[in-house]
Image: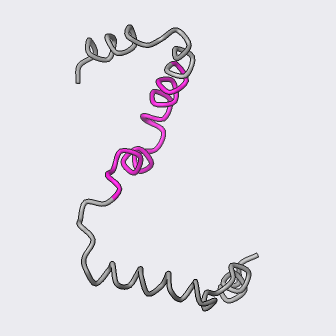
Amino acid sequence: MTRDAIRQLVDDLDERDLQTAERLLRALRDTADADPVLRALANASFDDEPETEEERAAVAEARQELLEGQGIPHEEVKRRWGLP
């Protein structure tokens, strides 16, 4: 992607979308140097490894436990961890 390609994208926007585009570009510019870790996280792919059959089975089991009322309420988890 080049600056010219980005300029073309902006030129192709409907007038109604310019304010949103400006907000997004300003946010990108303003956070570019603020925190390199946050920037890396924001640009990272969600997950680069395929889900394994074992992971799928564990998620299915956890969902079934929740359906059966075996989950731990949020307030209980916070209490166990000593959180407010």
> Relative to 46, is 63 above or below?
below
Horizontal and vertical percent position of residue 74: 68, 79
Horizontal and vertical percent position of residue 56: 33, 78
Identify the residue at horizontal 32%, vertical 17% (top origin): 6
Q: Main secondary structure of the magenta part?
A: helix
**Drawn side of residue 54 relative to residue 12, left or right:** left
Q: Quadrant of the C terminus?
A: bottom right
> What color scheme is it?
one colour
Identify the residue at horizontal 73%, vertical 81% (top origin): 75
Q: Nearer the viewer, residue 3 or 35?
A: 3
Horizontal and vertical percent position of residue 67: 58, 84
Q: Start and end of the magenta stretch?
A: 22-46
> Relative to 69, is 33 above or below?
above
**Drawn side of residue 30 relative to residue 71, left or right:** left
Total count of labels: 0
Q: Quadrant of the N terminus?
A: top left
Q: Is residue 44 magenta?
A: yes
> Relative to 76, is 16 above or below?
above
Horizontal and vertical percent position of residue 65: 53, 89
Identify the residue at horizontal 34%, vertical 11% (top origin): 7
Q: Nearer the viewer, residue 3 or 15?
A: 15
Identify the residue at horizontal 36%, vertical 48% (top origin): 40
> Relative to 3, is 73 above or below?
below
Q: Quadrant of residue 83 in the image?
A: bottom right
Q: Quadrant of residue 4 in the image?
A: top left
